[in-house]
Amino acid sequence: MASEPVARAVAEEVARWGGMRQTGVTLRYMMEFGARPTERNLLRSAQFLRKELPIRIARRALDLDSLPFGLSTKPAILKVRDWYLDSFRDIRYFPEVRNRDDELAFTEMIKMIRVRHTNVVPAMALGVQQLKKDLGGTKGFPPGIDEIHQFLDRFYMSRIGIRMLIGQHVALHEPDPEPGVIGLISTRLSPMLAAQHASEDARAICMREYGYVKPHLHLMMFELVKNSLRAVQERYMNSDKHAPPVRIIVADGAEDVTIKISDEGGGIPRSGLSRIFTYLYSTAENPPDLDGHNEGVTMAGYGYGIPISRLYARYFGGDLQIISMEGYGTDAYLHLSRLGDSEEPLH
């Protein structure tokens, strides 16, 4: 346990760094910079992260301390806040990165931070579940609860950015990268192939290739296809009719690649459409425990898959839209910016 003066000093540092200006990056910049992972470039990358990460992490730690409705006091939220404070200390007090040995040691340290934060999403969801219980379920939400939704959007978007920056730097150390792969970014990723991997029902032709982060695209596609398959299965479970397929169409535009996932699973009532992008309305009564390390499955288990998928799409200038015809089916439109010039949305 830290002594009171030490804790106060850390709190003052967090407040100071949390007030500093963040520096956004674009996917194109990451690709161009990472295309030449020379010792000098890796050193510059580490020096940038040593200054940038404490700002982003401090902002989130401050947010976690000032949430409404007592959410900040929930045990799971306090645990997340402590992870962020530990990571802030680790980076803030890491010696200046001046040479290759320093850079390698820094890289090992941020690897550990990435592992430490693996379970942030389920821990946050657990805290929200604890709040829901206190408020008596979704019907008891007081006015102003939207503030928590806005915080969670901001928080998870920032987490995507932090993990992207760390993951990209770490991945640039891979000794034998695959052709067309720059860190985490695949410059030859075919949306058609990604759609086929997500579902055997993919019916699309899109052979042009563009730069995107493969795990992000897979997570979004997996979530949308899984929801469509489940809706169709539930609708036709006791029917003599043959269940219609889930259809995937990939449209290859000059600015965007749009992936449309269509099902005939009965659709979503209009009253429920706004809720699918919120975090407090999850229907998961028994969320997964915090020991698992498969983030995609964990998010799905909490009902977070759709709102977080939209954040992944928006991270580099895309979007996710859901259009429903109640009584028939649902169309999900996943827009991915082809240009890679959109800067991170920083808060």
Image (cartoon, rainbow, N blue to C red):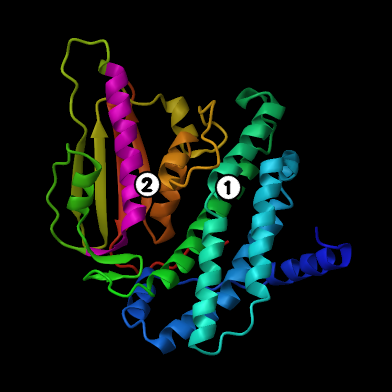
Q: Considering depth in this image, is 292 or 209 the residue closer to the camera?
A: 292
Residue 179: x and y, percent? 21, 71
Left/right placement of residue 150 relative to residue 192 reads right
76 falls in the magenta region: no
Q: Distance of mark 2 from mark 1, alpha carbons?
A: 17 Å
The residue indicated by pointer 2 is 320
Q: Residue at x 46, y 34 (%)?
A: 301
The structure residue drawn at horizontal position 34% and vertical position 32%, both measured from the top left corner, is 227
Q: What is the x, y in percent for residue 169?
A: 44, 72
Residue at point 59%, 77% (across, down): 51
User: Mark 1 falls on what kind of element?
Assistant: helix
Q: Residue 152 carries which label?
A: 1
Q: In this view, does 83 lie above or below 141?
A: below
How crowded is the residue under tag 1: few (<14 C-alpha within 10 Å), some, or many (20+)?
A: many
Residue 134 lies in quadrant: top right
Relative vertical location of residue 99 with respect to residue 89 in this rendering, above or below: below
Q: Give the range drawn in magenta.
A: 210-235
